[in-house]
Amino acid sequence: MIFRQAARVVIVDKMGRALLLRGFDPARPDEHYWFTVGGGIDPGETSVDAAIRELLEEIGLSVEPVRLGQPIFRGEVFFTFDGQNYHQEQVFYALSIGVLGDEMEIISTGREDIEQRTIDAHRWWSIEEIENTAEVIYPAELPDLLRFLG
C-alpha cells in the first residue's frame, strides 16, 4: 500500500455549483467517476503549495495562496489506481471564482501524462445534481461542504 498526502480544491461559482473533473482508473476504463481538482503533495510542498500547483496544472487557473484560506475539510481514503493500492490523507480548500463557471476557460494542457490520458471531461454541478445522480462523485461529503460554503 502506498501512503500519500493530497491537497484538493472545491471550486465554487457564483451559483454555488462545484467544478468537477471526470476520470477513470486505467485498469478499469469503463468505470468513470467525478472528483475535485487536486492531487498529491510533492516533497517540500505545503498543502497550499500543492493545491495552487494542481489548480494550474489541471485547469490552467493561477491564484494567490491567500485566496484558499484555511482548509474546509480533512479526510482519508483508501483506493486502487492503475493496480496500486493507496492510503491517502487529504485536505480540502475552497475557492470561490465569483463568476458563472460556464464563463471560465478550462485549460488542460498542464496536466501530467496520466491525467491527460484519464481525465476526459469537466462539469459544473449543483448540490441537487450531485445528490440525485447515479454517477460516482468524490468526496461523498461534497454536498455538505457546498452547503457549508453557501
Image: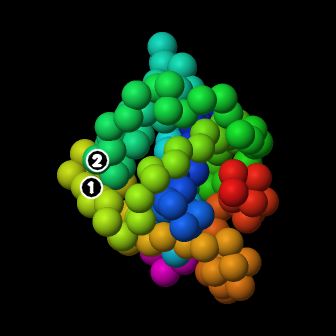
* Image: magenta residue range: 27-31
Decide which of 86, 76 is in the foreground and name it: 76
User: What's the distance in space between the residues labelled 1 and 2, CA to CA?
Assistant: 6 Å
> Mark 1 — residue?
108
Decide which of 63, 135 is in the foreground and name it: 63
- Residue reaching furthest to the left: 109
On screen, residue 51 above or below 107? above
Residue 10 visible: yes
Q: Which mark is residue 6?
A: none
- Of labels 1 and 2, earlier in sequence is 2
Quarter of the N terminus within the rendering: top right
Disc 1 residue type?
Ser
Q: Is residue 130 left or right of residue 100?
A: right
Q: Is residue 92 left or right of residue 123?
A: right
> Mark 2 — residue?
60
What residue appears at the point 71 percent right and 85 percent down from the top-left corner? Answer: 132
What residue appears at the point 32 percent right and 37 percent down from the top-left corner? Answer: 62
Count the numbered circles shown. 2
Disc 2 residue type?
Gly
Decide which of 63, 31 is in the foreground and name it: 63
Image quarter of residue 146: bottom right
Decide which of 10, 137 is in the foreground and name it: 10
Residue 114 visible: no
User: What is the chief secondary structure element of the magenta stretch?
Assistant: strand
Q: Under tag 2, what secondary structure?
A: loop
Residue 43 x/y as whole percent: 48, 18
Residue 109 within the magenta-colored segment of the rendering: no
Badge 1: residue crowd in 10 Å (few <14, some 14–19, many ≥20): some
- Nearer the camera: disc 1 or disc 2: 2
On screen, residue 90 above or below 117? above
